[in-house]
Image: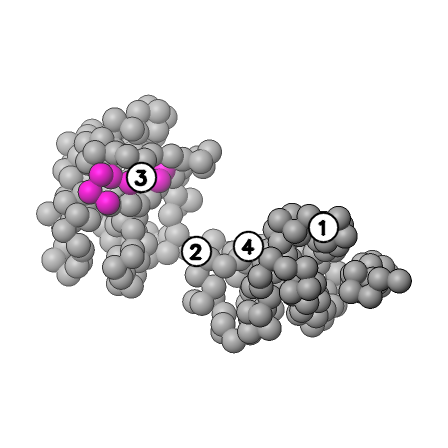
Amino acid sequence: MHSPEIDLPHNHEVVMNRFIAACQADERVVAATLDGSYARSAADAYSDLDLGLITTDEAYDDFVAGREAFMRRLGELVFLEDFDLPNIVFFIFADGTEGELSLGRESQFNHSHSGPYRVLLDKKNILVGTVFPRHQPEPAEQIETLRRLVYWFWHDLSHFITAMGRGQLWWAYGQLEELRRTCVNLAHLRHNFSAEAEGYEKVEQALPIEQLAPLQATFCPMEPEAMLQAGHAILRFYQELAPPLARTHGIAYPDALERIMSGRLEKLRHPR
């Protein structure tokens, strides 16, 4: 029931064929798609199954409210959550099939998906010529993201210093992770300011990974001296990225704050 050029593992094929049949039989559904890595011909053994579904306008709210019953037609559910997202649901079936279902309504479905897709069903030919553009943040949105990263780093560094000073190593170790993630997001923005900064998710595909080499040594044992060294290394990485990025995009860099916080961190290594 699916296009022969799509190569899926057996469990994914079974679920997708059930999905097509369920969509075909449901009068509320007008179109269905295969999305994600399968649509990009980039799937591997770890790929999940990304599906898309479009209903009539009149049936959308009813379908969303009863989506669990629809999903149970595809297999034995062991997990179904939307995590308060308005048009997506995450699922896992007992056969190990894991994936996402994106939902849209006939008059407004471009927001329900981005990137390549393959048509599985199109009862009204509404998908003919349709392109789902990838979301690209507006420049003002990116500048605000950068501003928050530049300033929030010092807030997290303050917590790291406090936790280390009190000998609360678990808290301090958590703050190291927050600081490191901020630096990864700054590296994202330095490499491609128009793309979303998404932390570690698929970072190997988003930027040359060697740019993050200075952070590798900061994954350290939970020992005070090693953690202080990691904190200083993360700070140096930040100081190489944040000031030039801030200048380039018209953000006032907090020099006075840097002096204060850097001094506090130095005192942990050389207490009087």
Q: Residue at x 25, y 59 (%)?
A: 45
Q: Nearer the viewer, mark 3 or mark 2?
A: 3
Query: Which range of residues does the magenta coloring cover?
Result: 89-96
From mark 2 to mark 4, how far is it between C-alphas? 10 Å
Label 1 close to label 4 by CB (< 8 Å):
no
Q: Earlier in the sequence, mark 3 or mark 4?
A: 3
Q: CA distance from mark 3 to mark 4?
A: 28 Å
Query: In the structure shown, which secondary structural element does the residue marked by tag 4 occupy?
Result: loop
Residue, x 27% and y 49% (percent of image)? 49
Three-letter code for the amino acid on which mark 1 is drawn = Gly
- Do residues under tags 3 and 2 come within 8 Å of each other at their CB atoms? no
Q: Amino acid at mark 2?
A: Arg
Q: Which mark is residue 134?
A: 2
Mark 4 Cα shell of 10 Å, populated few (<14), some (14-19), many (≥20): some
Residue 129 sits above or below residue 16 on the image: below
Q: Position of residue 26 (x, y in %)?
A: 19, 30
Residue at image mark 3 = 91
Relative depth, front residue between 136 and 65: 65
User: How many numbered markers are drawn?
Assistant: 4
Quarter-of-image position of residue 7:
bottom left
Residue flagged by tag 4: what amino acid is it?
Pro
Q: Dot 1 corresponds to which residue?
A: 167
Cα distance between the residues tagged 2 and 1: 45 Å
Q: Which dot, 2 or 1, sits closer to the camera?
A: 1
Query: Please, what secondary structure does the residue beneath circle 3 have?
Result: strand
State how far apart marks 3 and 2 are (Cα): 23 Å
3D distance between C-alphas at marks 1 and 3: 42 Å
Label 1 and label 4: CA atoms lie apart by 41 Å
Name which of mark 2 and mark 1 comes first in the sequence: 2
Q: Residues within 10 Å of mark 3 (few under 14, many from 20)?
A: many
Q: Is residue 31 left or right of residue 187?
A: left
